Image: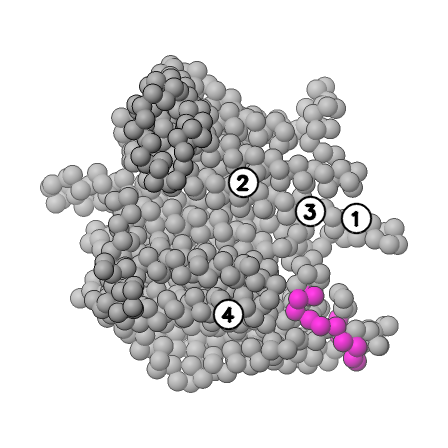
């Protein structure tokens, strides 16, 4: 791999060709795939030589933005930036080619989450509810919601605690400068999980938490298989969160007004399934004596 | 020809069965058949001893063979073989019950995927990769819990399950690192101190995965929101796998077995989980909450059985996992019917539903009473085994366990009184379409209830399996 990216993206070494023949793949398209990846690896390698403070500052800023703002159109780009920063920091401890897995997996997850969030917003827009883009366009700078202030105070406390923990309980391993970054991400992730109820935000908190764990653990166990599997974890968890975010987005369908113009009380999620799909699967309607409860069919 | 290691097939067969189960998800019979065949094949495979080689033409299978994957080994070791059989048997029962009582379009394929991952978690070494397998299983479980439900706060159960399982991940990863460092310490006195953080981290990780801390966060949310058979699946198969992994750790690591901190932590988690389930069970007003309390009490009791190092305690743990799968499965099957009928599982709104669906009421009553430990049911055998172990060591906890059973029984009785009461008159109900059970659902409920009752009266088969599982471990000798 090093032979590939040291050439700055130009594949001059054709030692890959026999392997490609095994996969019945011609060298030309393979090079077209590998060359950009090599460029990315080389870029990550160069970026990893940056000084630590700017990287940590970027990581802290992205984590703060994610904790303070509850708008996916702002939070998801911040999460992508955070994944790139985590990738750069990981490249200081492990092979850049392996560290690249993190930003790539994170970007894929963010794409999946954005699709789910967009779908949910489309539904909300259909019901005339406030959606993410409108909240950005009509932002009221003069009246900062009390919730944001509360989150800011909590974030300040958590960041202080993370800094204190990094000083008092430094993580083992050679790459100690990653410890503070790990503590910041873990604490902000837990804060986000603990303070939100929406699946998308909780899920983003979980992803931030997992990034922190990866930042803490990868320097201790710099093996390719662990890094690859942790990348897969990000993907698995991301898919699950996207699914839950979709379910959350559909949730407010239940508050639509019914035929009589009266707002219908939100029903518990399980009931909707029971009342609609599951009941249809489970029961065949039959006209018999009246039963004790209302029939969803 | 090189024999194929059975460990590979244990992982691949459920995954392979998940494909037709997903493709044929509209045809319930084919979906269930794929799952049953998959589980049956693995059970048949693992019923051979670990030293055996099965002479399949063209594909000889070595039961105890090792699969090396990027320097990690995947092996069916003798102590793991029968626990794996038990997990697949529990899954088979729950998939069988869901045949005519659907629990969501993706429940069977996802269940098979989770089964494959947790079994890989039991077989893989080093155990850091087991933590990753359990985390992946938790991600799939979150989708399984959510199923196709949508509604305000409908994702709480799935979120909590995923978040708590993810919190367990760093505990296992950290323990893996500490163990690696402790191996370099040569002084035995210092080495035991070096292992101490790993032991505590592992205890915390296991407790989080088993739903013990922070108290009953995922158990109640999941039992209330997930389809009942999904709850049964998670309680029997996933938590069962976590329990067997714990036993495997005791078998493998002396420092883990001998750590007083681990014992104290597991005891504390067990008692609090048991206590909370028992304290609130009698006052519940819905079957979902009763199911949650049953889960808490059973998990708490199982945690308490992990501490004593006797063959009886290991047998009690193994027996409890089998009994939990069957009891919660039958309970969940009955509850599925009642929930579908009334759109809720509140006692008040299900008034009279037991007369309309007597088989569902029978299944719910038998399953719940079994977890409560009513004499004559399968759960009674579990409680009997628990009492035998605890009577010699901890009489107070034994009494708490028995009282928790009484509390569950009280809650179940309250529910049954409502279920079997006369239905209230409803205006305009005459002539309206009333749901009826699909063909085969009644038979599933009846068969489940009969099997549960028969095994309660003659638990020899399960006791023999639990005894064999206990004798495969040697840490208590």
Q: Give the residue pinned by disc 4.
A: B33
Q: Give the residue pinned by disc 1.
A: A256
**Residue at mark 3 to residue at mark 4: CA–CA distance:** 33 Å
- Tell me if I can see residue B322 in this picture: yes
Q: Is residue A290 magenta?
A: yes
Return the disc, 2 or 1, that comes first in the chain's sequence.
Answer: 2
Looking at this rendering, what residue extends furthest in the right direction? A260
Q: Position of residue A248 (x, y in %)?
A: 64, 45
Q: Label 4: how many residues lie within 10 Å, few (<14), some (14-19) or many (20+)?
A: some
Q: Is residue B421 magenta?
A: no
Q: Label 2: how many residues lie within 10 Å, few (<14), some (14-19) or many (20+)?
A: many
| Mark 4–mark 1 CB contact (< 8 Å) | no
Callout 2 secondary element: helix
Q: Indicate whether A177 appears above or below B391.
A: above
**Apparent side of residue B4 relative to residue B364 in the rendered image (left or right):** left
Closest to the camera, between mark 3 and mark 1, is: 3
Total numbered circles: 4
Point out the stretch of residues depicted in magenta.
Answer: A279-293
């Amino acid at each position: 791999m090093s032979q590939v990216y040291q050439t700055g993206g130009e594949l001059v070494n054709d030692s890959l060709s026999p392997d490609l023949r095994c996969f019945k793949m011609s060298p030309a398209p393979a090079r077209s795939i590998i060359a950009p990846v090599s460029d990315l690896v080389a870029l990550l390698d160069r970026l990893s030589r940056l000084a630590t403070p700017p990287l940590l500052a970027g990581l802290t800023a992205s984590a703060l933005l994610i904790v303070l703002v509850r708008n996916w159109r702002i939070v998801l780009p911040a999460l992508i930036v955070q994944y790139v920063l985590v990738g750069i920091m990981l490249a200081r401890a492990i092979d850049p080619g392996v560290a690249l897995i993190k930003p790539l997996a994170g970007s894929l997850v963010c794409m999946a989450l954005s699709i789910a969030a967009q779908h949910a917003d489309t539904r909300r827009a259909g019901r005339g509810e406030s959606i993410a883009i409108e909240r950005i366009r009509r932002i009221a700078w003069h009246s900062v919601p009390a919730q944001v202030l509360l989150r800011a105070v909590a974030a300040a406390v958590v960041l202080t605690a993370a800094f204190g923990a990094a000083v008092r309980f430094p993580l083992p391993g050679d790459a100690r400068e990653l410890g503070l970054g790990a503590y910041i991400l873990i604490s902000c992730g837990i804060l986000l999980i603990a303070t939100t109820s929406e699946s998308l935000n909780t899920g983003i908190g979980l992803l931030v938490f997992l990034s922190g764990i990866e930042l803490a653990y990868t320097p201790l166990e710099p093996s390719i298989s662990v890094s690859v599997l942790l990348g897969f974890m990000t993907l698995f968890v991301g898919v699950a969160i996207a699914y839950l975010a979709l379910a959350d987005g559909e949730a407010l369908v239940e508050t639509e007004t019914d035929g009589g113009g009266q707002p219908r009380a939100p029903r518990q999620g399980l009931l909707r399934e029971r009342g609609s799909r599951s009941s249809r699967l489970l029961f065949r309607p039959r006209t018999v004596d009246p039963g004790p409860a209302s029939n969803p069919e | 020809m090189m024999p194929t290691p059975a460990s590979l097939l244990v992982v691949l067969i459920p995954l392979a069965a998940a494909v037709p189960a997903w493709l044929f998800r509209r045809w319930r019979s084919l979906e269930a058949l794929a799952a049953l065949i998959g589980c049956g094949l693995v059970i048949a495979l693992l019923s051979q001893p670990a030293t055996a080689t099965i002479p399949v033409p063209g594909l000889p299978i070595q039961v105890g063979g090792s699969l090396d994957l990027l320097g990690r080994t995947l092996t069916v070791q003798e102590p793991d073989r029968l626990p794996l059989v038990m997990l697949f048997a529990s899954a088979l029962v729950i998939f069988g019950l869901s045949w005519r009582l659907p629990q969501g379009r993706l429940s069977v394929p996802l269940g098979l995927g989770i089964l494959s991952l947790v079994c890989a978690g039991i077989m893989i070494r080093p155990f850091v990769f087991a933590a990753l397998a359990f985390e992946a299983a938790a991600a799939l479980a979150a989708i399984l819990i959510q199923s196709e439900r949508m509604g305000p706060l409908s994702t709480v159960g799935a979120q909590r399950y995923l978040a708590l399982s993810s919190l367990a991940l760093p505990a296992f990863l950290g323990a893996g690192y500490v163990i690696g460092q402790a191996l370099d310490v040569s002084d035995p006195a210092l080495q035991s101190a070096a292992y101490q953080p790993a032991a505590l981290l592992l205890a915390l990780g296991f407790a989080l995965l088993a739903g013990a801390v922070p108290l009953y966060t995922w158990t109640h949310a999941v039992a209330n929101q997930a389809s009942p058979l999904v709850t049964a699946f998670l309680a029997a198969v996933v938590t069962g796998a976590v329990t067997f992994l714990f036993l495997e750790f005791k078998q493998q690591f002396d420092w883990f077995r001998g750590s007083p901190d681990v014992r104290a932590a597991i005891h504390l988690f067990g008692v609090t989980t048991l206590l909370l389930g028992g304290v609130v069970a009698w006052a519940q007003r819905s079957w979902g909450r009763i199911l949650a309390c049953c889960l808490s009490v059973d998990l708490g009791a199982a945690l308490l059985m992990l501490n004593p190092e006797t063959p009886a305690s290991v047998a009690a743990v193994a027996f409890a996992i089998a009994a939990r799968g069957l009891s919660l499965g039958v309970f969940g099957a009955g509850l599925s019917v009642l929930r579908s009928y009334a759109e809720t599982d509140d006692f008040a709104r299900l008034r009279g539903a037991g007369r309309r669906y007597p088989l569902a009421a029978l299944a719910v009553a038998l399953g719940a009473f079994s977890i409560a430990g009513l004499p004559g049911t399968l759960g009674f055998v579990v409680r009997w085994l628990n009492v035998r172990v605890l009577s010699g060591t901890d009489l107070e906890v034994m009494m708490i366990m028995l009282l928790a059973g009484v509390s569950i029984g009280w809650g179940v009785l309250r529910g049954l009184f409502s279920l079997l009461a006369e239905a209230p008159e409803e205006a305009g109900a005459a002539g309206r379409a009333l749901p009826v059970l699909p063909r085969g659902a009644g038979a599933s409920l009846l068969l489940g209830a009969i099997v549960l009752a028969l095994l309660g009266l003659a638990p020899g088969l399960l006791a023999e399996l639990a005894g064999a599982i206990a004798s495969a471990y040697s840490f208590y000798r």
